[in-house]
Image (cartoon, helix red, strand yellow):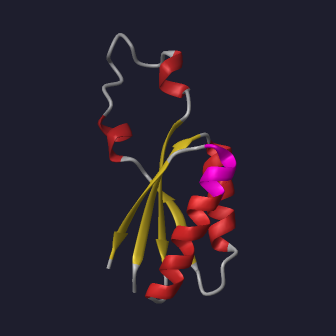
Amino acid sequence: MPMVRIRLNGSEDDASALMTAIHALDDIEHVEEIDDEMIAAEDLDSSSAGLSDDFVTGVHEIEIEAPHVFAAERVRKVAEAVADQLGVPIEIVDEF
């Protein structure tokens, strides 16, 4: 099964809107936001930890499992349309 990973740079609401639009597609059952490994590696003892810059829009990693290549292509098209509508940048990484 094709796996599509999307990296979205925006708010939680932006990520939720993208995930909702993708989940509404036929045949798509697996849509989830995965944890960013960089967050776990962040040094919380740093003198800059917790500053407002840490809480501005962030990067969201979204993983979608499609049943076939045609569904994966629909996911890509919908993701690009939603991102354009929201005005947020995305990066699509496909794994076949």
Span colored in magenta? 82-87
Q: Position of residue 4 (x, y in %)?
A: 43, 70
Q: Nearer the viewer, residue 16 or 21?
A: 21
At a point 38% along the width and 13% down the height, the residue shown is 48
Location of residue 46 in the rendering, given as x and y in whole percent from the top left corner: 32, 16
**What is the x, y in percent for residue 5?**
42, 64
Vertical order, 51 against 91 (above or below):
above
Q: Quadrant of the N terminus?
A: bottom left
Q: Main secondary structure of the magenta part?
A: helix
Task: State which quarter of the image contains the C terminus.
Answer: bottom left
Q: Nearer the viewer, residue 82 or 65?
A: 82
Q: Residue sitting at 48 percent across and 15 percent down? A: 51
Q: Image height check: is 76 above or below 13?
A: below
Image position, residue 66 (x, y; %): 49, 82
- Residue 43, quarter of the rendered image: top left
In the image, 78: left or right of 42?
right
Does residue 14 show up magenta in the picture? no
Quadrant in the picture for residue 80: bottom right
Q: Is residue 31 above or below residue 29?
A: above
Closer to us: 33 or 22: 22
Q: Residue at x 40, y 81 (%)?
A: 2
Q: Left or right: 13 with respect to 10?
A: right
Q: Magenta span has 84?
A: yes
Residue at x 53%, y 64% (from the top left corner): 32
Q: Count of labels shown?
A: 0
